[in-house]
Amino acid sequence: PRAHSYTKYNTWSEIEAWIDSTASANPTLVSKQVIGNTFEGRPLILLKIGKSSTSTKPAIFMDCGFHAREWITPAFCQWFVKEAVETYGSDTEMTSLLNDMDVYVMPVFNVDGYVFSHTNNRMWRKTRSKISGTSCIGTDPNRNFDAGWCTIGASSDPCSDTFCGKTPESEIETKTVADFIRRNKSTIKAYITVHSYSQLLLFPYSYTYNLAAHHSELLTVAQGATAALTSLYGTRYTSGPGAATIYPAAGGSDDWAYDLGIKYSYTFELRDTGFHGFLLPESQIKPTCEETMLAVKYIATHVKNNL
Ligand SMILES: NCCCCC[C@@H](C[SeH])C(=O)O
Ligand SMILES: [Zn+2]
Ligand SMILES: [Zn+2]
Ligand SMILES: [Zn+2]
């Protein structure tokens, strides 16, 4: 049977096994939490990364695999965890980050969709929920959050790839993560959601063209993060508010987190700009993850320094 590798697109079962082995191999830095189940009954799993402490530390929440076909994103979340456990104690930035904060990493948000994209349809995007009254399957989880829900850049057609759902948080995956973040909103200082592709670093709002209250700080931090990213291999990124930078899109997790009071809320669109698109070759996993680490560490360090 295939083994887990940080430089290949692992199957869900390989990722699940990796989660368990990583947590058990690093008991003082890593703990596993199952926070719920998907529509098809798979576990929704968080890894809590940070120097274990009896007191509650401020935290960052990062998720990958929102959209099934965006395979580079679970690869990045796995890479982040690898870098954290490997460089804690040697890399000063990572060490002070994990001493002072916790990072909740959700390697795969849309587990059912990720499995389906491996077994049936590589280009699948949505969840795999059954919707009453139609044979069409699934909701776009990034249109399903209660943030300007279904007002713009989303569809009320269940057969659309941007179907917003029958109601906000109709998807059990959305509700489970929203509940977790609501429960922990006093400690969660930043929300990062990792998508592909387009090479963008986006921040609120996408449900309106109005600028966020913290627009200037969010832009400055995004520009610093993308400059750090570009410094490694020259990969060019664009930063900006979602509506104007990519397209208007209501119901997004980033807008929802921001309006909940989590100021540092970012959406990444990783490599590339369309040559391979969602089918990014495995040869680009390492460089993509290495450069993205620089951007995520930049944001995390800014958050830590501005607690
Ligand atoms: N909250 C919307 C952020 C901008 C759009 C992000 C992309 C990722 Se594939 C989308 O959900 O269409
Ligand atoms: Zn996406
Ligand atoms: Zn995308
Ligand atoms: Zn190529």
Image: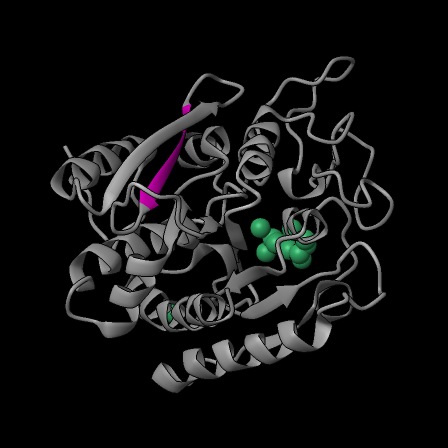
Q: Is residue 96 visible?
A: yes
Q: Residue at x 53, y 43 (%)?
A: 66
**Residue 106 picture location, percent across and down:** 42, 42
Q: Is residue 57 above or below residue 137?
A: below
The image shows residue 193 at horizontal and vertical percentages of: 53, 53
Q: In the shown orientation, is residue 123 left or right of residue 57? A: right
Residue 2 located left or right of residue 101: left
Please state which of residues 259 and 100 is positioned toward the viewer in this rendering. 100
Residue 123 is left or right of residue 291, and the answer is right
Estimate the x, y position of residue 149 in percent, counting from the top left: 80, 40
Q: Which residues are magenta?
A: 43-48
Decide which of 118, 271 is in the foreground and name it: 271
Say whether residue 47 is magenta.
yes
Q: Nearer the viewer, residue 285 or 28?
A: 28
Dividing the picture into quadrants, the one containing residue 95 is: bottom left
* Ligand 3 quarter of the rendering: bottom right
Q: Which residue ends up furthest to the top in the rendered image?
A: 132
Relative horizontal placement of residue 91, taking residue 289 as reference (left or right): left
Q: Residue at x 80, y 68 (%)?
A: 211
Q: In this orientation, does residue 192 appear?
A: no
Q: Residue furthest front?
A: 55
Q: Residue at x 76, y 65 (%)?
A: 212
Colour mapping used in the image = one colour
> x%, y% of residue 144?
70, 36
Location of the N terminus (image quadrant): top left
Q: Is residue 100 magenta?
A: no
Query: Number of marks in the image?
Result: 0
Q: Residue at x 51, y 70 (%)?
A: 306
Magenta span: chief secondary structure: strand
